[in-house]
Amino acid sequence: MVFNQTAIYALRAMSTLAAHDGKGYQRSRSLSEWSGVPTSYLQKIMCRLGKAKLVKAQKGHNGGFRLSRPPHDITLFEVLEAIDHDLVAFPCVFGKHECDTDNPCLMHDTWMELRECFWNWGQTHTLADAVERPSLLTPPVPMQQTHL
């Protein structure tokens, strides 16, 4: 399971809002800078998150975005679902159109176990977890190659 760019940006934006929870509305430009999400892309993502009622938007001088609920009440699964990222979509490793318990591929059981792990991760971790444990959403640093 690999998150697409929109999913990554949504998680970045929402965890940034969670880190600033209680500090009022955050302006788009600031949110873009803090999260590393391009402003034009951020607007599209925030619109989707607003439709899902995960963020509130306010126009004007003191406007911007803020979470609609406390960070501990918003799961990572909700964020991904709001931007139409299917957290449990795991196409068959062998490319079989119909891969299920009645017609499994060689990897079916193991692949479904991985799917279940991702689903549990999304349902049990919240934005508060991401803020309390920043490594939860931080991509791993690529390993350095050593030359012998």
Image: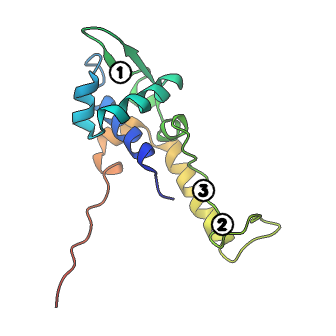
Q: Which circle marks residue 116 in the picture? A: 3
Rendered residue at 53%/34% (across/down): 82
Q: Residue 123 location in percent, x, y?
A: 53, 43
Near-viewer residue (30 or 103): 30
Lower position in the chain sequence, tag 3 or tag 2: 2
Residue pictured at 68% horizontal, 70% vertical: 108
Q: Is residue 62 above or below residue 73?
A: above
- Front residue of 109 and 144: 144
User: Is 116 situated above or below 67?
Assistant: below
Residue under circle 2? 92
Label 1 vs label 3: CA separation? 31 Å
Kindly report the distance in space between the C-alpha atoms of the residues bearing marks 3 and 2: 14 Å
> Which x, y percent locates residue 115?
59, 58
Q: Amino acid at mark 1?
A: Arg
Q: Is residue 105 left or right of residue 11?
A: right
Q: Tell me what residue is drawn at x 29 percent, y 46 percent.
A: 134
Report which quarter residue 110 is drawn in: bottom right
Image: 107 above or below 84: below
Which mark is in front, 1 or 3? 1
From the viewer's perspective, is the residue at label 2 or at label 1 nearer?
2
The residues bearing labels 2 and 1 have C-alpha atoms spaced at a distance of 38 Å
Question: Which amino acid type is marked by label 2?
Answer: Cys
Mark 2 surroundings: few (<14), some (14-19) or many (≥20) residues within 10 A? some
Residue drawn at (57%, 62%) of the image = 114
Amino acid type at mark 3: Glu
* Mark seen at residue 66: 1
Callout 2–callout 1 Cβ contact below 8 Å? no
Crowd band around label 3 with a 10 angstrom C-alpha radius: few (<14), some (14–19), many (20+)? some
